[in-house]
Amino acid sequence: MSIQDVHAAPKKGSKNNTEVSKYEAEIARLRAQLSQKEQRESELEQRERQIAERERNLLNQNGAATPIANSESTATNVSNSATTESAIVLAQKELAEADNLGEVVVKGRRNNPLEKLKDTPKSVSVVSGQELEKFQANNFQSIIQKIGNVGMTIGNPQTASTFIRGVGVSDKLNGLDPSVGVAIDGVSYATSAMISSFSYVDLDTVDVTRGPTGTRGGKNANLGQINITTRAPTFTPEATGSIAYGDWNTLITKATLNAPIIEDVLAWRGSFYREQADGYIANQWDQDYYYRNKDRTYGRIQFLLTPTSNFNARVSLDYTPKAKEGSDNASVWNRPTPTFYDTGRSVDQSNESFGKLSRRWFTQQTNYAPGDYFKNELNIQGQRYTYYGTKGGTLNLNWDVANHNITSITGYKDYYFSSGGAGDNPFDVSRPPASGQVDNSQYSTELNISSKPGGFVDYKAGVYLSKVKIPSRTNLTRFGSDAGAFRANTTQYNILDPLNDPTKLNNAANQTLSASGRGLLLNSIDRLSTKLQEKYENDSGALFGEATWHPIEPLAITSGLRLTHEQRTSTSSAKVLDNGFAAELNPVSKNNVQLGGFASNSNSGVLITGQNNAAQLTLANFVAQKYFGVATYGGLSPEQRRQVAAAKGIRNTALGTLFQTAEAEPFNGLLISGNIGPSWKINENETAYFSWQHGEKAGVAQIIGATVLGGKSVPNKAETSNAYEVGLKSVLLDKDLVINADLFLNDITDYIQPMLFEDTVQTALNNDGKIAYTSGLGNVPGVQTKGVELDASYTGLKYTTFRLAGAYTDAKYTDFKFMAKPVELNDGVGVAYYDATGKNLPYASKFSANLYAEYARPLPEFLAFSDKFQFHTNVNYKYASKFNTDKSLSRYAEKNPLGTTDFAIGIGRKDQLFDTNLIIKNVFDQDTSYTPTWNTYYPTDKRWVGITVSSKL
């Protein structure tokens, strides 16, 4: 019976009221069904138009707005055309996500994202933004924990670095290009610090491509590329919001608004994020300071303009105001220094921190005992928060002209970072603001053209330009009133405070010497400030191109070439910012910096004959008057002169390496990147491939240390990477099971990594029985990483998805004969280096795995409202076998195998008007902390439990 038939039925008498009521009920039911059907058809029609529009835009953008295509990560159609399949993948993905809950109800299974990569002749992993949101993975480190064979170092954002296949670690970034590139919406970022400092919201996908990249545009990277794609504006109105509350007073709010401004012509999208949380460790000195607190605000606004069918423009502006957080470099828990070096020589414990805090100067404070130094707590005077902020913009223009796509990508980003470094005890040793400060900006633009796929050859070519400026990177050192007593070596301290020896307390002469000596200890470096300032400029210009040839049906051959001109310049200076209370104790000079002190013997304190002019002799007499009440320096006793020498030695050591502004030897060269890779489509469900990828990374212009002539330039050579990969991608069990496996071998020559360089001058000044080193970047002659990788997913069980990413990786130094000795070998005897050939690289785990499982289904029918609600749960397990966190591979820095589990469970409406999710990170409270050296311990985040409530309109 149709509705029309019901309406046409003749009226009956009152005796037929019951039947009329039945007809009326039937009419109401059919009308409701028709209304639902029409609404559904309208939604589907609107969605189809949106998908068509989205696919057209993405095709036109040729990957600009979808960096998956732009950075070579998901070329997935039969012809290996990255552009076409990226558009299809994302369009299908958008439909699947938009109608995700309904799809589960109808099909009982999920789409398999790895299936879309079955024809991609490279090692690629992908994770969706929807999955990341389920775990509140809102920062870069938590994001990459969901991806296989990718990792990130532990530390403050400025020194963080990303590695792939066990290679890429660098904690001294400066002007160094990252070996693992990161791009957001097609714009490559110049430093890892820009990526690791901020929060991420409203993401579409995150993907990683392993091996050298660059032949399809963007910034070239020697080891791999991570692409983050945000959700773009659409013409479908949308509003989402969520609130999360959890341990340590965590409060996270998110909001997204999307709407058309002019139907089918102009749309906008706004995304907002705010996170605030206490850390789980409070500073005992200042209870308002928390270690690893969160204070993050982020906003992004986008506009999409589609005035014609063959042109679109996307503008994105983002801003993170300066935030303050308790930095990782303030998180050290101290441990007792071992009694012996591994060489068998005993450690001079009096020159260790515990021994220094046992000095009479510090034991005067009765509420702090030397043993408190080893408590599992933060007790730091003057600790300052770390500040950082950024703003930027992106403009993507896309034309579809004459069977080609033309794309322009322009981006700007700046970055500010100021570390809150301080000491590791409650005394006035280091004063804020101290440590590092960085201003950074980058500008890049790209213009490329690509053919429409399907011909004998599909190609893409273009030009890329970028400029990176670091006008100011400073390292401030500021000393307090307790610094002289703490930084003095044992010999110096005992000369200046002879009463430190209890057997000398009743000696009147020693009491007099101690009074004057403590004045020298107090003034020697109180308020002294030094400043290392560096400036870097990196200029890059590249021509790139890649083509995929199809000589016969199952065979495709991809080849690419990139020519990049790189120029790196740097200037540095290290000067005194403030002389503090004791300029009179300065040396005459340090290197090429004149300090105006007087010349005296470093041990006896006797004036050096013939090396002091009248002004210097007057200054020496001033020292005698100020600290001893003696009219002339010549009137001082030998013991008093030795005290002056000791105080001058403390100050000379604290001044460190000084030099006037020096220009480093620039790096200037033409670098070549390329790739060639045949793939053979065995059948519709299996593809085998081989690839060779060649990459070259620019060296660094840098100043490391100084000589009497000034700053010392230590240039780096270009780094060269050759990666070989053979793989098989299979779709099995009626597309329920996808297995992507590969074997890889990557040889790297002149690998650029942080190094320690022996500093013989500072070693002599310190006089503490250890070799002193200066940190910088250097070339390791040979590095190799090899292994096997597996990405698999299974969707054959109803309502369930499983994904596994596993790898065996052997990353070693094949030639490295000059690694700085780790602390347990640095006994001050013999050579400063050892042969690390054959050893594993820092942070390189042999075995790693990432297992993800999801279960989402309608509520059982016997429950109320089962037709409106859905149950969902997710779990992610991350495993890494043991690795070493020390750049010199100290045996004390080995991290035992670690597996952490994140879990989420919740319930929500199918139409997403309401959803709630319980999240537990690190379910079993595994110890993720580490020991970077033999007497320090870095605590990291513990188990976190929170609940999220969200809604989508």
Image (tube, rainbow, N blue to C red):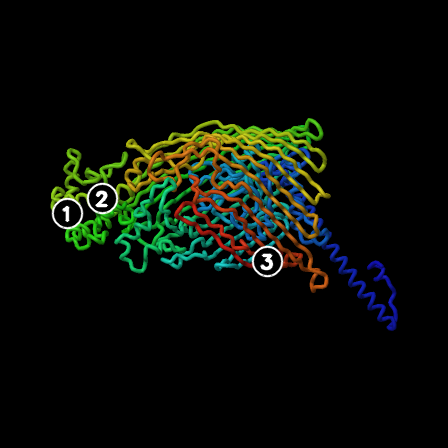
Instruction: Name the foreground residue: 263 vs 725.
Output: 725
Circle 2: element type: helix
Rendered location of residue 308, percent (x, y): 63, 40
Instruction: Name the N-terminal-most of marks 2 and 3.
Output: 2
For the residue marked with disc 1, what is the amino acid? Answer: Gln
Measure how far apart labels 1 and 2 are at the Cα level.
17 Å
Q: Nearer the viewer, mark 2 or mark 3?
A: 2
**Disc number placed over residue 625 in the picture, else none:** 1
Q: Tell me the quarter of the image containing the C terminus.
A: bottom right
User: In the figure, 820 relative to 872: above or below?
Assistant: above
Query: Residue 220: in sight, yes or no?
Result: no
Measure how far apart labels 2 and 3 are at the Cα level.
64 Å
Labels 2 & 3 near each other (Cβ < 8 A): no
Q: Tell me the quarter of the image containing the N terminus.
A: bottom right
For the residue marked with disc 2, what is the amino acid? Answer: Ala
Q: Is residue 402 left or right of residue 710?
A: right
Instruction: Name the N-terminal-most of marks 1 and 2.
Output: 1
Circle 3: element type: strand
Labels 1 & 3 near each other (Cβ < 8 A): no
Crowding at mark 3 (Cα within 10 Å: few <14, some 14-19, many 20+): many
Task: Name the residue tied to disc 2.
Answer: 646
Task: Name the residue tied to disc 3.
Answer: 917
**Disc number placed over residue 920 in the picture, else none:** none
Instruction: Name the N-terminal-most of marks 1 and 3.
Output: 1
Q: Is residue 877 left or right of residue 892?
A: right
Circle 1: element type: helix
Rendered location of residue 57, percent (x, y): 63, 41
Rendered location of residue 13, percent (x, y): 88, 71
Most extreme residue toward the front is 344
Crowding at mark 1 (Cα within 10 Å: few <14, some 14-19, many 20+): some
For the residue marked with disc 3, what is the amino acid? Answer: Asn
